[in-house]
Image (tube, coloured by chain):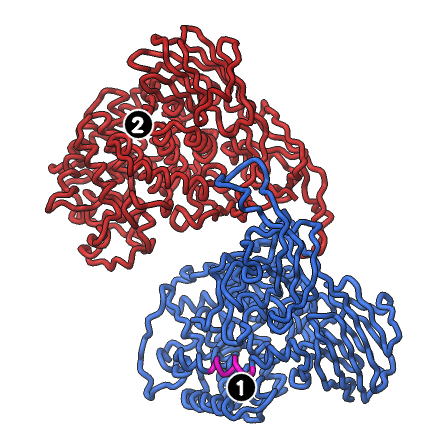
Chain colours: A red, B blue
Amino acid sequence: MRQYSPVNFSVVRIEGDFWRERLETVLTRTIPSQHRQLVANGILESLTIPKPAPPLRIPRNSHDFTTQIFWDSDVGKWIEAASYALSHRRDAVIEGQIDEITDWLADAQLPDGYLNCWYIGREIDNRWTNLRDNHELYCAGHLLEGAIAYFHATGNRRLLDIMLKYVDHIATIFGPRPGQKHGYCGHQEIELALIKLYGATSDKRHLDLAAYFINERGRRPPHYFDVEATMRGDNRADFWAKTYEYNQSHKPVREQDKVVGHAVRAMYMFAAMADLAAELGDNGLKQACEVLWHDVTSRQMYVTAGLGPSKFNEGFAAYYDLPNETAYAETCASVALIFWAQRMLNLDLDGHYADVLERALYNGALAGLSRDGEHYFYENPLASDGRHTRWKWHACPCCTMNVSRLVASVGGYFYSTSDDAVAVHLYGGNSAQLMVGGRRVTITETSTYPWSGKIDIVVNPEIAAFTMKLRIPGWARDASASVNGEAIDIGTNMQRGYLCLARTWMPGDIVTLDLHMSVERIYAHPSVRMDNGRVALMRGPLVYCAEQVDNPATPIGDIRLPRDAELTAAPRAGIFGGAVTVVAKGAAVDAAEWQDDLYRTSPPAGKAALWTAVPYFLWNNRQPGQMAVWIPEN
Amino acid sequence: MRQYSPVNFSVVRIEGDFWRERLETVLTRTIPSQHRQLVANGILESLTIPKPAPPLRIPRNSHDFTTQIFWDSDVGKWIEAASYALSHRRDAVIEGQIDEITDWLADAQLPDGYLNCWYIGREIDNRWTNLRDNHELYCAGHLLEGAIAYFHATGNRRLLDIMLKYVDHIATIFGPRPGQKHGYCGHQEIELALIKLYGATSDKRHLDLAAYFINERGRRPPHYFDVEATMRGDNRADFWAKTYEYNQSHKPVREQDKVVGHAVRAMYMFAAMADLAAELGDNGLKQACEVLWHDVTSRQMYVTAGLGPSKFNEGFAAYYDLPNETAYAETCASVALIFWAQRMLNLDLDGHYADVLERALYNGALAGLSRDGEHYFYENPLASDGRHTRWKWHACPCCTMNVSRLVASVGGYFYSTSDDAVAVHLYGGNSAQLMVGGRRVTITETSTYPWSGKIDIVVNPEIAAFTMKLRIPGWARDASASVNGEAIDIGTNMQRGYLCLARTWMPGDIVTLDLHMSVERIYAHPSVRMDNGRVALMRGPLVYCAEQVDNPATPIGDIRLPRDAELTAAPRAGIFGGAVTVVAKGAAVDAAEWQDDLYRTSPPAGKAALWTAVPYFLWNNRQPGQMAVWIPEN
């Protein structure tokens, strides 16, 4: 079922300036500072449970909830990100920190294997009584992903063994047998983690448990969350979100054809569904994924690949309802979209998946991390009056470690391989050691991508005959390619977004690719009423925005981009080490001309205005100010 | 201080088709159906209090509130509207209903004069302990306005006497003397009512009490609502709205220069301030009103003269923050804006006040009442996806009776008089018996306004020399006038929006006025970002909207109005008895041309589309559907 296999990030050495800078920032600043935040915010302390544990009932909020309930997941996600860092270079301090956490978790784990520090420390008698709200399996999933990553990075399997014991416990509690709970988590995540575990253990039970959670989800009657609420003595109608669409359990996953509810939950689930489709050859799951993919990308996705416009449910609203200033567009959701996109791409090599992956990576996800590596966006609006600024930390720090684990493993998204092909999805300077048909293929790419579309790839294969499949991005109006200086006709060699070069490769063969990178005006579907009469700018995979700091003379709300305005890409040495800005010979409202009237019969007069846009992911790194992605044309 | 005096609606006989239809609908359908609703919803029953009253503590909502607390005000407002109906023609059924209510109120009134049925029936010991939230003086104000209106309509003073006894009680409780409460109501209204009472009684104490409430408001330290909260044992920080801006008590009224908080509260207060400025010659209050007027009309008012975009506080948000689909724009707020505008206009005859008054009357307020007279809008968005529809009643029915009392007394807004002048603010067929300098002036106007701007006015004066001041609306690009067929030069005779005809008038003199009524394209201030690149249509005082029912072939979201589109006013016999529609030779998105992509590099293609707009106030009277006031230009 799976056409291609992903490549572990550890075999891809990032060498180009763009990702090198992000990666170094994450390794040297983000990972250590996140550990400091976990300490400062009491999250690590919460793992150290006095014995005997006090029967403490912590006050929760009006719908009986506390964010402390997912602190285990934050720890797990930090371990995962830190372990990816260790894969780049070992670090005794970080390893000591993970070992210390492992000690606490070992201490906390109950004899039966159960390991959720919130429940153990506070209300152990209530464990497994509220899967709908209380994130136990979600926390287990993130700790498990952390344990797997640490094992891969260091070979140290102590934490993994702890988690294997917990997984064994989970497998006794949940399943189809009589006396087992026929439940699943209100926040999907354990499924992904179990499939990843199966990749490490090849133990089919791990895959089966993941499949059980996915297939059981949303079955009725009775609905598991109803059963559970009744057993707690709760009125099921009291569920704050009112609908099980919130956690995608409103119907069995195979019957879902519209993307609804909490965005991160949805994306984690779809990623797991795509994984299961591949591992089990389950065509029903694959088809459900394809329908849902089309639904979300053609009706519900911001131009930044942000997902989930609504703050209320941290998720999806009506089709085409994509407000800019109030966009929730949680960083985690774009990160999770990347996970899903990668899995779809390996199921079925189609450039559309890679286009969305790249859009999410360079925009919706990357915006979540500041230039200094220690500030974050949780919400990613596409316009701001100046009040939206980066956080040093967040009461719910999920996004902080989602973006660090993404950047620390970014090389894993560049390539996929099959028995007879290498697919190149993303570009940027790197050296990769790939395996094709059991033989090594070394690829060395030189490029300043995404600032330029000029790409040189040197191939050093142990195997002679295989196909290089080079993605020609959907944004590229024009592209040219050559092998060893000999031009390749792209049109006749294209397959679903990939230029296919099937040949006998010799060491030192050079593929050059020139993806013509012009500044493009982007229009939204006319049903996105917020963007009617507005235009956004992209260059290559980067969405641009106008930020106040670059345009001190013109309020961002006043700038305009008439259809005939000249747009120029201009690298600026002074901005983040040479980011390419876009300079518009555009227009602006003539503020002096429109007096005090609120309404009048003549349109606002414009005046010529030169204004500058910067890549969206870089916004709010210099000073707070207004920002807009979608610019009125008149 | 007051330049002009308002004219009681009872001396203006409405004869033109436009207002005659609305008035007859209110008299024959709205007033009786509102009584039925007061019965059906238990509101009238709440006035009949068992003796002894049960010490019942009714459950309230999470911030200790119930809408039942203002049921007295709904009764008072219905009595007021019904009494205005009686002024048009007496009706034994309605009078019997009001007399029955009077019996209940007489029974309910405590020996000391106190008369709030909610507190008497439920928790009398708590009276006057929570002015901030519980509307006691607000309810008193509306009952008082009802009592005054009923007295004026019928001469029956029984209800008025009950209320005078209550006012006497209120005057012992509140005031500057030691032992009195130095408080004021969380919802302004009593002030207006007391000034109206002063107009009936000429008892200066009534005016003084109104002035006391206005002048005491927002004084600190300590703030009265803090004092009161502490006495109740509440934490003052628990106030749900968080800020006393909500009820305009954040600072003394004379220091307020920005319109904030709950829109209806604000408008009722400003109207009372303007009244007091006039009655007391208080220039400080007048100046505060002028600053606030400019603030709200130049930065915070919808093109429909709707006020208060936010549902959260039923009120004002940031400057220029005027979202269309989520506009709260409560009907009551536009009605109350009319009250304030009329008072400003009488303080200072300036057409700007009348322009806003007229805009609110024909749009924001009139939209609140259905064509059948028995359905209502509480919220008045300027765009809808089809889900916003009229209510048969409302849990908080304030708007229903605000619009019926407005329509039943609409003639009162047409004219003002002074010792030597008649000012004509509004047009439409009517006959009016006015007093100028103690002598009668009869005016008979023939016009189909607002469908046409052609106006004939026949003057029959007992006095010879006086000035007719005819408003030339701000929307009129061009106007011509004549007296007895002789053209008048408008330019040289204009004073602040009024054409001033000072002459010796003879019986039968005919003034003709032709206000050129073209379809106008309206643009919003560029800071109203929701309306960037969009245009609205007005013809005369009417704002238009595109409604789905008139445009079955084109989703309203798809219609466009290029700048060069031809616009034609077209009376349609089949729509509400000949409403003038606007037909646009405009454009629409070519839906077939834009395929599945959510984003692309070329703008949506348009196609020619003939579409129809109807007056905004008439929308949602045929069938539910999409609606938009602001139409994208491209």
- Identify the amino acid type marked 1: Ala
Asked whether the viewer can see residue B244, the reply is no
Asked whether the viewer can see residue A262, the reply is yes
Circle 2 residues within 10 Å: few <14, some 14–19, many ≥20: some
Asked whether residue B230 is drawn in magenta, I would say: no
* Picture coordinates of residue A16, whole percent (x, y): 47, 18
Nearer to us in this view, B260 or A136: A136
Nearer to us in this view, A496 or A326: A496
Q: Label 2, label 1: how many angstroms apart (C-alpha)?
A: 81 Å
Circle 1 residues within 10 Å: few <14, some 14–19, many ≥20: many
* Residue behind mark 2: A2
The answer to whether mark 2 and mark 1 are in CB contact below 8 A is no
* Picture coordinates of residue B352, whole percent (x, y): 71, 65
* Residue behind mark 1: B147
Q: Chain of mark 1?
A: B
Name the quadrant containing residue B297: bottom right
- Identify the amino acid type marked 2: Arg
Q: Is residue B462 above or below residue B608?
A: below
Residue at image coords 77%, 65%: B516
Q: Is residue B44 left or right of residue A538?
A: left
Residue at image coords 23%, 54%: A226
Q: Is residue A291 above or below residue B379?
A: above
Q: Chain of mark 2?
A: A
Q: Secondary structure at mark 2?
A: loop
